[in-house]
Amino acid sequence: MPSWSRFWQHVAHRPAQQAWGLACDGSGWALVGLSWQKAAGIRVHATEKIVPAGDDLTGVGFGSGLRQRAVHSRQRVSVGLTQEEVIQGVLELPAQLSRDDWAAEVQLEVAQLLGLEPDEVNFDFQSDPVSDGLLSRVHWVGCDQARILALRDEVRSAGWRLDSVEPAWHAAQRAAIYLKGGLDSLLTQAPQDWQFDLTPNLSPGHELPTSGFDVGSDLVLKQALQSAAGPRLVASGLALKVWL
C-alpha cells in the first residue's frame, strides 16, 4: 500500500513526463511542475505563486489561479495538507492482527480525537519495520474528510484532477531525500534549479522510512520549510510521488 494513500486513493502507476504539486505557503499557494527527461533526470520546469482572488475567498483559495495555469484538460495535481490540518500519533497493536484490523483501530482513534464519526475522517498508517513479535508500533495520520472533499472540488472546478493528498511534512521529506546535493543544497540553490535523482535510498513503491532523517537532518529540513523555498519543497515532494 502506498504511503498515506487513504487520504486520497492514488491512481495506479503510469508513465509520466510531467507532474504537479500544490502546497500552501500561508498567504497563498506554491505550484511546482516537475519534468522527467531521460538524459537529465527530474528537474523543476515551473514554479509559481497562486494568490487567492476574489472568487476564491469562500473556497480553498487556489481555484481561479490554478484554472489560469491549466495546460491541458484534466491535468493532474497533488495537494499538501498543512500541519494544522492533520493529527498524528502512534498505536501499539497486536502484531497478529490483519492490516484491515489495524485500519479499523486507526480510523476509530482518528474519529475520536477529531470528535467525528468514523466515516467522516480520512487516515492512513504504516508500521515500524521492526517489532518485538507481540506488538507493532503503528504510526498514523488523519484529518477531517471534509477538507479532502473541499480540495477535490476546488481542483475539479479549476479543470484539473486530484492525484493525491498528503501531509506536507512527508512530501518535504521525500523531496529532501531525492534532491541532488541533499539537504545542504536546500538553502543554497534556487528552487528553479532543483534536480531530483530517484535512485538513492528508496526503491519505487516503498514507504518513507520513519528513521530516514536523523535529528540534525530534521533541524535542517525544518529550517528549510520555514524559508521562502519551503512550500516549493513540499510541492516538489508531492509531484515526485507520481514516479514512485
Image (spheres, helix red, strand yellow):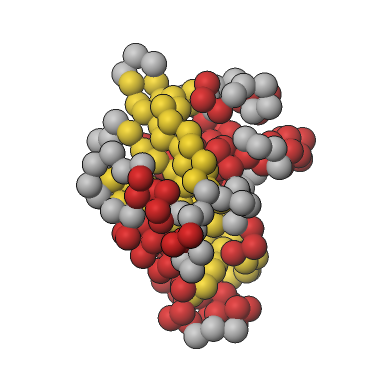
Look at 67% across and 21% down and name the residue there: 188
Residue 94 appears in the picture as rendered: no
Q: In the displayed structure, does residue 47 sit left or right of residue 8?
A: right
Which quarter of the figure is the N terminus placed in?
bottom left
- In this picture, is 121 found above or below 157? below
Task: Work out whether 87 lies above or below 21.
Answer: below
Residue 225: where, in percent of width, then height?
67, 41
Residue found at the very far front of the displayed protein: 54
Q: In the displayed orientation, state which residue is furthest to the left.
A: 73
Q: Which x, y percent locates residue 94? A: 56, 71
Residue lying at 44% horizontally and 25% vertically, measured from the top left: 43
Residue under the image location 31 percent in, 18 percent down: 38
Q: Position of residue 37 (x, y in %)?
A: 33, 21
48 up-or-down from 150: above or below: above
Q: Going by the picture, which residue comes out furthest to the top?
A: 39
Horizontal and vertical percent for residue 51?
Answer: 52, 49
Quadrant that contains the C terminus: top left
Between residues 105 and 28, which one lies in front from this camera angle?
28
User: Is residue 154 rendered to the left or right of residue 49?
Assistant: left
Q: Quadrant of residue 133?
A: bottom right
* Vertical relation: 40 (above or below) 19: above
Q: How many marks?
A: 0
Q: Give the residue at x 28% y 45%.
A: 75
Tell me if residue 188 can be seen. yes
